[in-house]
Image (spheres, grey):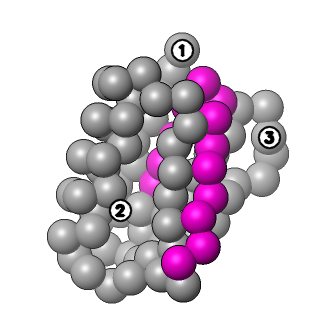
Amino acid sequence: MDLKIGVINTTREIELELGDDHDLIESETAKLEQALANGARMIWFTDKKGRRVGVVADKLAYVQFEGEPSSRMVGFSG
């Protein structure tokens, strides 16, 4: 499963390859929503090789999970 992260004022997406666990979308979405609700300054994502990528929460435009029959996009506006 792939994760694409859009960042405000940036033309390129950040792309990460995640594991194939089908519950991963729900757990990552819940973690992301909780971090934003708690006012986190950085949002951290980890790929399947253990590499971590941090995005400043105020600059997060969208997060898109791909690899499921129905891709799910979570958008933000500020």
The quadrant in which the N terminus is found is bottom left
Q: Which residue type carries mark 2?
A: Ser
For badge 1, the amino acid type reads Gly
Residue visible at 62% across and 58% down in the picture: 53
Q: Dot 1 corresponds to which residue?
A: 78
Image coords of residue 66 (percent x, y)? 43, 69
For this view, does 3 lie left or right of residue 9?
left
Which of disc 3 and disc 2 is earlier in sequence? 3
Marks 3 and 1 sit apart, C-alpha to C-alpha, by 16 Å
Q: Secondary structure at mark 3?
A: loop
Q: Is residue 14 left or right of residue 4?
A: right
What residue sits right under mark 3 in the picture?
Answer: 10
In the rendered image, residue 27, in percent from the top left (x then y), is placed at 23, 58
Please provide the residue range marked out in magenta. Answer: 50-64
Q: Earlier in the sequence, mark 2 or mark 1?
A: 2
Q: Is residue 70 left or right of residue 52?
A: left
Q: CA distance from mark 2 to mark 3?
A: 22 Å
Q: Amino acid at mark 3?
A: Thr
Residue 50 visible, this angle = yes
Label ID, residue 4: none
Q: Which mark is residue 71?
A: 2
State which quadrant residue 16 falls in: bottom right
Q: Tell me the residue at 34%/24% (across/down).
A: 38
